[in-house]
Image: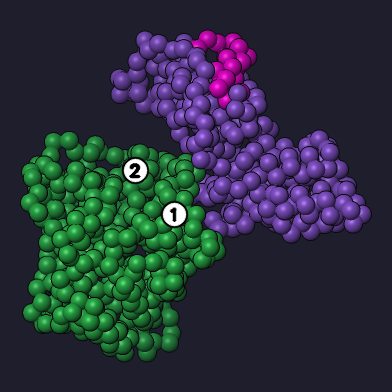
Chain colours: A purple, B green
Amino acid sequence: MNDLASELFFAGIDIGSTMSKAVITDANNVMRSYVVGPTGAEHRRRANRVMEEALGKAGITLDKIAYIISTGYGRVNVPFADKQVTELTCHARGVASLFPDVRTAIDIGGQDAKVLRIKNGRLVDFLTNDKCAAGTGRFLEVAAETLGLELNEMGRISLQTDTPVKINSLCTIFAQQEIISRLSEGQPLPDILAGVYIAIATRVVKLARQLRVETPVVFTGGVAKNPGMVKAMESVLGVPVLIPQEPLITGALGAAILAREQAFQLIQRGEYDTHREKMLSEAYIEYGEGSG
Amino acid sequence: MAIAINKGLSLAHDIYEDRGRRVRELRKAGRKTIGYICLYPPVEIITALGMVPFRIFGNMSEPITLADQVSTTVVCPFLRSIIDLGMKGKFDFLDGVVGAHTCDIGAGIIVQWRDYVKDAPFTHLIDVPHTDHPPAVEYFAGQLNSFKRHLEEYAGQKLTDDKLKKAVELHNTQRKLVRQLYDLRKPDPPLLTSAENLEVLVALFSLPVEEGNDLLEGVIRQVSERSDRPGRKKARLLVWGPVFDNTSLFKLIESAGSSVVVDDTCVGTRAFWADVKAPYDLQALAQRYLVDIKCPRTYRQAEPAETKRDYDKDLDSRFNYIKKAIVDWNVSGAVLQSVKYCDTHGYEVPNLRHYLDTLGIPSIYIEHDYSERSLAPIKTRVEAFVETLG
């Protein structure tokens, strides 16, 4: 590594459907800071804020960042990114940097679920749910709203039982109706909650089985923070899952790792522009693009 | 129709945008146009009887609003789109429609056309067996004979051997020219984009065969000499699947950093790869359409007398023509696409993916509901797939 490269920092920014994440790494791939913030239509425009906070936490300025890769659902809207890479590739790299032997990664986000097959740290195959909120974080939010509970409360309560009720419908709207009718039948709350987690896990594992599940399995995304969800996932999968300390930021971390790789390649080829102008600006958003 | 130099692609584009424009003119001059659905009605018979064969496609950017009255949403959305357009009068330039039992809904759609699409004085359904065994070919030749007699009656003239021979020669010429057009995507980068290629093919399905051949010659000359060639991309892909008559998917794939260099779809190679062989009679047509067209709607697994299934041999006999395309076009990955509810194609996907795995060709499978809107969520998956090829 030459002197120029050793002083550089790299950033990955992941604009998901509900959360925005930024990660800053250094020349040795060590994470210097990370930030997780809500997305929403208005927040997504403020991708620069997440970035600003991450810079602040790391104590560095934007001009020290050699390369920025944006990823996630809103990746095309980040004007200060040098390159866009899909969240599938970034998650795979991020997960593999934390768990080098990983073979399968399951990520459940706010509005999508994905299963990645990883070999030697690289994405080799993947599946995503198509245009439906079933089996995603949104499903849990709807269930929580229906029951008048906080999301983290829900997970804790669900752990009180080993006899989950069966939620047959995988459609978010029908499942909501099913939860209400189970409640009116007088089923205990923990059983219903555990049933909700099993329903999501079943949906996602179905996806994973199409790719053949190989261990070790890593579980990421906001939903992986929920102990009820983790328990359900392990019981449906039949194998234990590994969870990163911060399961929300693997995409942004992978993006930062790729940013470093990209910058080093440019430096090696003598194509890296050290004097390019850098400026954080609000993201533009095109409304009405048909995407789940 | 003489094609001015350097106008081939733009003419193809204009016809792609308004498919009925040429046949409407011809109709005013007294020429009849026969629409056909899927690949199995033999266009040679229509041409030989002095009429224009016009391949009926749906429209991915037109929402289906009327067809819900006559079929539910579990039915193939491509065929529903066709009936929807028909009910809206979008095919009012057609004098007749011929369909084939390519799949169950493909046959049902002709019945619906009779019932719900007005102004169709001629309709005909050709029964197509689902295997390529010799007795099936025999039966199919008989079906072609019934179609011939029915169309003779409508045309008020006999189909002579000479007329059929001339028509076969014209269509075989078209097939040869299309194969030459595909050769222009063998170099890296290819000389034309897959979207341009599709516009030319859709135009061919909207023109009399002679005019289509003129168009092809013009396009081939223009593309061979063009200076504004597409740039070099990271991956060279093959697209597989049922009908894809819209450039949107190809544009989406190419905007993800790859070139589509060849396909196995029924708007592309499947329609043009096989010639009719001499003697140019109904038996030869039956052989070409039922045996030589490689569409999953025809079951070609075990040999008729074979009872023990050899999996690898079976895969090879079903898909080795794809292996040849992979080698000839230097393909590095495959996008398998299907319209929702297409069971004939859905059945093939796991086996085909396995076959491609054994060839070391990575693949992705995507499903859409035959609407431009349904393609947007596919974009990330296609981009990620291209990233894995890097």
Q: Is residue B154 at least partly visible in the picture?
A: yes
Q: Which chain carries label 1?
A: B
Residue A63 has which mark?
none
Left or right: residue B260 compared with residue B228:
right
Residue at position x 86%, y 43% in the image:
A157
Name above or below for residue B52 compared with residue B229. below
**Which mark is first along the chain, 2 or 1?**
2
Task: Examine the rendered structure and indicate whether residue B303 appears above or below residue B173.
Answer: below
Q: In this view, does B372 lie above or below B243?
A: above
Q: Disc 2 marks which residue? A: B251
Q: Front-most of B28 and B258? A: B28
As drawn, is A86 to the left or to the right of B8? right
Quadrant of the drawing holding the C terminus of chain A: top right
Residue count near mark 2 (Cα–Cα under 10 Å), binned few <14, some 14–19, many ≥20: some
Q: In which quarter of the image is residue B36?
A: bottom left
Give, as a three-letter code, the residue at label 1: Tyr
- Chain assignment, label 2: B
Find residue A257 and report its horizontal and vertical position in percent: 50, 29
* Dominant SS type (magenta): helix
Q: What kind of residue is marked 2?
A: Lys
Secondary structure under badge 1?
loop
Image quadrant where one finds the N terminus of chain A: top left
Question: In this picture, which residue range is highlighted in magenta?
Answer: A43-62
Pick the residue in front: A248 or A59.
A248
Residue under label 1: B370
The one nearer the camera, A46 or B301, is: A46
Q: Does B25 appear in magenta?
A: no
